[in-house]
Image (cartoon, grey):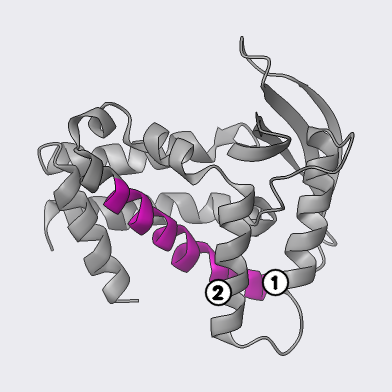
């Protein structure tokens, strides 16, 4: 196993507890990016959680249809390009446009194949959305508080980072019990890039190889 493979394997192991705690994709499912008239970030997230559970836990869905729905929801509700740029950090600027595009495609594939299976463990958890407040210096960004109510165990505190896109909103990060998923992913991919000399093209090939083994 190469150093890059080891780094990616360890990265997946570190992220798994976060994903499982959120059942992932109450956190990684999406919602329409175009808001209803008067809809704010908190209402957006309430609609998000309802749609995610309804569409991805429907009885009788085959694997292909579940993946199709999941991929569509992610594309509509998450700002994958913004997340991908953040995850790569300074390495994003070193890559050419074609490599950047290739990374974003394989990054989305990794999200799909890494997290979709966790919906099999869905046990009726609900996202109870709280208040939304401006986040940082940009008035287009908001932090929305929430808790994931579970039938067993204590509720899980989750903050959502969303930003306005046109007339709607998209998610750029999820912070579960103080742990940022975007920061965690940045650390994971940064470790892999450090081990391969900062070559994003090599990282793309490593991720493709990993996906081919799934």
Q: Is residue 28 magenta?
A: no
Residue 173 in the image: above or below residue 122: above
**Would you say residue 106 is visible in this rendering?**
yes
Q: Which residue is mark 1?
A: 56
Q: CA distance from mark 2 to mark 1?
A: 9 Å
Left or right side of 2 for 62: right
Q: Is residue 112 magenta?
A: yes
Relative to the observer, which residue lies in front, 7 or 66?
A: 66
Residue 30 placed where, x, y %? 66, 54
Q: Residue at x 64, y 70 (%)?
A: 119
Q: Residue at x 80, y 26 (%)?
A: 132
Left or right side of 125 for 201: left
Residue 161 in the image: above or below residue 150: above
The C terminus, quarter of image: bottom left
Magenta-highlighted residues: 101-121
Q: Secondary structure at mark 2?
A: helix
Q: Residue at x 61, y 9 (%)?
A: 137
Dot label at residue 185: none
Q: Secondary structure at mark 1?
A: helix
């Amino acid at each position: 196993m190469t150093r890059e493979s080891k780094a990616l394997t360890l990265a997946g192991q570190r992220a798994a507890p976060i994903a499982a705690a959120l059942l992932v994709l109450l956190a990684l499912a999406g919602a329409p990016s175009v808001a209803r008239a008067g809809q704010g970030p908190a209402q957006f997230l309430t609609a998000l959680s309802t749609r995610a559970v309804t569409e991805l836990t429907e009885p009788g869905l085959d694997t292909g249809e579940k993946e199709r729905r999941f991929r569509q929801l992610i594309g509509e509700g998450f700002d994958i390009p913004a997340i991908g740029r953040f995850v790569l950090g300074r390495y994003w600027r070193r890559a050419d446009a074609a490599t950047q595009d290739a990374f974003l495609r394989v990054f989305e594939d990794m999200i799909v194949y890494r997290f979709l299976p966790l919906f099999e463990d869905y046990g009726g958890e609900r996202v109870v959305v709280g208040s939304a407040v401006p986040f940082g210096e940009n008035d287009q960004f908001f932090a929305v508080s929430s808790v994931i109510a579970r039938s067993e165990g204590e509720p899980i505190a989750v903050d959502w980072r969303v930003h306005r896109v046109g007339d709607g909103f998209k998610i750029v990060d999820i912070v579960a019990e103080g742990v940022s998923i975007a920061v965690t992913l940045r650390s994971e991919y940064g470790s892999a890039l450090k081990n391969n000399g900062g070559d994003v093209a090599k990282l793309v090939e490593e991720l493709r190889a990993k996906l081919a083994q799934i």
